[in-house]
Amino acid sequence: MLHRSNGASAALRVCALYPDLMNIYADRGNLLLLERRCRWRGIGFGVTASGLGEPLDPDGADLFYIGGGQDRDQQLCALDLAEVKRDALHAAADRGAVILAVCGGYQLLGHSYQLGDETLPGVGLVDLVTVRSVQDRLIGNVAIEVELDPNVRRVLAGFENHGGRTHLGPNAEPLGRVLKGHGNNGVDGYEGVRRANVIGTYLHGPLLPKNAWFADWLIATALGLDAPLEPLDDRLEADAHADARRAAGV
Ligand code: GLN
């Protein structure tokens, strides 16, 4: 049985934000993969949901997840995030909970998402803005190089499809460097954002089934484990990762 650094036995508590609205490109697969990789190791797992109008308990989960969404669904969620969940998400981030946001969810982590004449509020967890472009959507296979632990460089591979262009401010660090694909805006070569355990990325895939190593990093980080996770038979997952890299040409 794995233990947290405080000696308590480990069980991962996940809270999915707006799972019925923010879930395009099979983002639910990300939650399923977290569940399986915990269960296969005998780590408990529980998932709760927080939808529109529902308060969020900042201590109620180790990992908060927001998936991708269409602009119209993002409009609803942006207002709810700003009005109902903002303080709780900041409190969760401040105590070191993992917050993982993909694509449409990622766009809402920053200061704002500008959609034509309308500017949607962001939750302000990271220093970035997103602007909906009238030019082509940025679509395709993508691979990025990340360094989540010092001096350990790894590749995340997936698929992106977004009309928004995200620009990091001076106080934001990208999640990674684009090896192939468009990334945040198709121009500066950066992808995603990272502030401690707050992570945003444009990578669908779904992201975690194609990058099982990243799922394990999230689990270990969210649980604050004092020992490495037990290895699993990852032959299928390694194939999925290799396929995603091949598709991106990396
Ligand atoms: N609606 C957003 C955009 O097009 C996000 C899309 C997504 O989550 N794939 O930029």
Image (spheres, grey):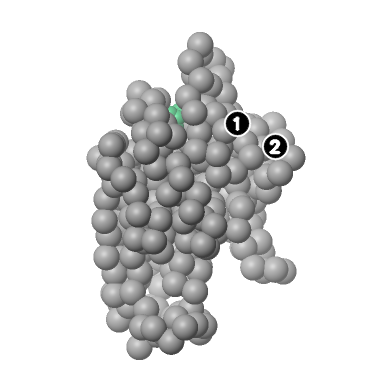
Percent coordinates x, y for residue 243 in the rendering? 46, 55
Q: Nearer the viewer, residue 105 or 78?
A: 78
Q: Is residue 249 visible?
A: no
Q: Secondary structure at mark 2?
A: loop
Are there few (<14), some (14-19), or many (20+) residues within 10 Å of tag 1? Answer: many
Q: Nearer the viewer, residue 66 or 86?
A: 86
Q: Is residue 185 visible?
A: yes
Q: Secondary structure at mark 1?
A: strand
Quarter location, residue 12: bottom left
Relative side of 203 to 183, left or right:
left
Percent coordinates x, y for residue 117 in the rendering? 51, 11
Amino acid on which the number 1 mark rests in the picture: Val
Amino acid on which the number 2 mark rests in the picture: Gly
Quarter location, residue 85: top left
Are there few (<14), some (14-19), or many (20+) residues within 10 Å of tag 2? Answer: few
Quarter location, residue 81: top left
Residue at 26% across, 56% down: 48
Residue at 65% across, 33% down: 167
Where is 37 relative to 228, above or below?
Answer: above
Cα separation between marks 2 and 1: 8 Å
Where is 90 relative to 111, above or below?
Answer: below
Q: Nearer the viewer, residue 191 or 55?
A: 55
Residue at 71% across, 44% down: 171
Find disc 2 in the rendering and name its residue.
169
Residue at 36% across, 34% down: 80
Relative side of 48 to 63, left or right:
left
Percent coordinates x, y for residue 194 in the rendering? 60, 51
**In the image, which disc is placed on residue 129?**
1
Cβ(mark 2) to ligand 1 < 8 Å?
Answer: no
Ligand 1 located in image quadrant: top left
Asked whether the residues under the numbered discs 2 and 1 touch, taking CB atoms below 8 Å apart as contact, a structural biologist would say yes
